[in-house]
Image: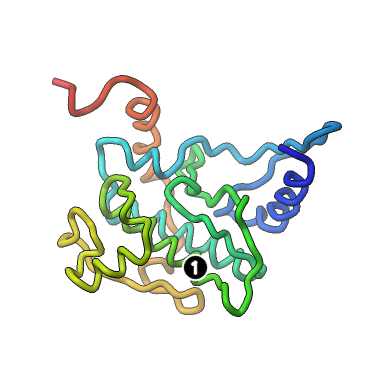
Amino acid sequence: MAKDTGRRQLEVLKKLSDHPHISTIEQSFETENAIFFQLEYSRYTLEEVLNVHTCLEDLHIRVIASTIFYAIQHIAKIGMIHNAISISTIRFCSSGKPVLADFDNFSFATTEHTANHDLECLGLVVLECMNGAPKKKLRDLEEVRRLRGSNKTFGLDNGEQWSGSIAKLQNPHRYVEREPGYGILIPFLELVPLECFALWRAAAAK
């Protein structure tokens, strides 16, 4: 990447990457025109996981929600906001551990712009996980609020199966207050290369 952009992102990640739920820097090096850095191996995104034929269940979603909640809590203590938390910026290590990645759009917190924005984005991520598949309408906060007010299901395709919860940085809901166990997500990661990067689809199998 370009040097100015690379140095900026490198300094940000150095401040953040000592946390287990944030993508960590393994090493970095600089050439005449660019800076390169190697991040912790986390090949697959949550978006890819949501495209496999097996849907995440409550236990899996809780692991993801808890992990990213702790990441948000950590960066908020430093006074920063990710600004782009989504199913495409949450990645998985080979152990099944979810990590928050891609800090290109970060900003520093102000009185008007706080970590609540990241929590709202995490809420939208959880809704897509609950939906069982990516759904563009669930990434529009105002639309989700409108649907929540009208039919109580947040616009989910299967909303009747779920109940609500609220996450706060200082007093987290019990849904996200326990340290998650990542291993249960490994089977989903194993399906990603089979179903997302190959012609085979489960629905077509006989």
Q: Position of residue 201 (x, y in %)?
A: 25, 25
Residue 92 or residue 124, whichever sits in front: 124
Residue 197 or residue 5, whichever sits in front: 5
Quadrant holding the C terminus: top left
Q: Position of residue 16 (x, y in %)?
A: 66, 57
Quadrant holding the N terminus: top right
Q: Residue at x 46, y 37 (%)?
A: 44
Residue extending farthest right: 32
Q: Which residue is mark 1?
A: 117
How was this image coloured? rainbow
Residue 54 or residue 88, whichever sits in front: 88
Q: Residue at x 57, y 73 (%)?
A: 113
Q: Is residue 89 above or below residue 76?
A: above
Q: Position of residue 71 (x, y in %)?
A: 54, 60
Task: Quadrant for residue 26, please give it.
Answer: top right
Q: Amino acid at mark 1?
A: His
Q: Residue at x 37, y 56 (%)?
A: 139
Task: Quadrant for residue 149, please give it.
Answer: bottom left
Callout 1 secondary element: helix
Q: Is residue 107 above or below residue 96?
A: below
Task: Quadrant for residue 137, please give it.
Answer: bottom left
Q: Position of residue 60 (x, y in %)?
A: 34, 51
Q: Residue at x 34, y 31 (%)?
A: 191
Q: Is residue 166 above or below residue 49?
A: below
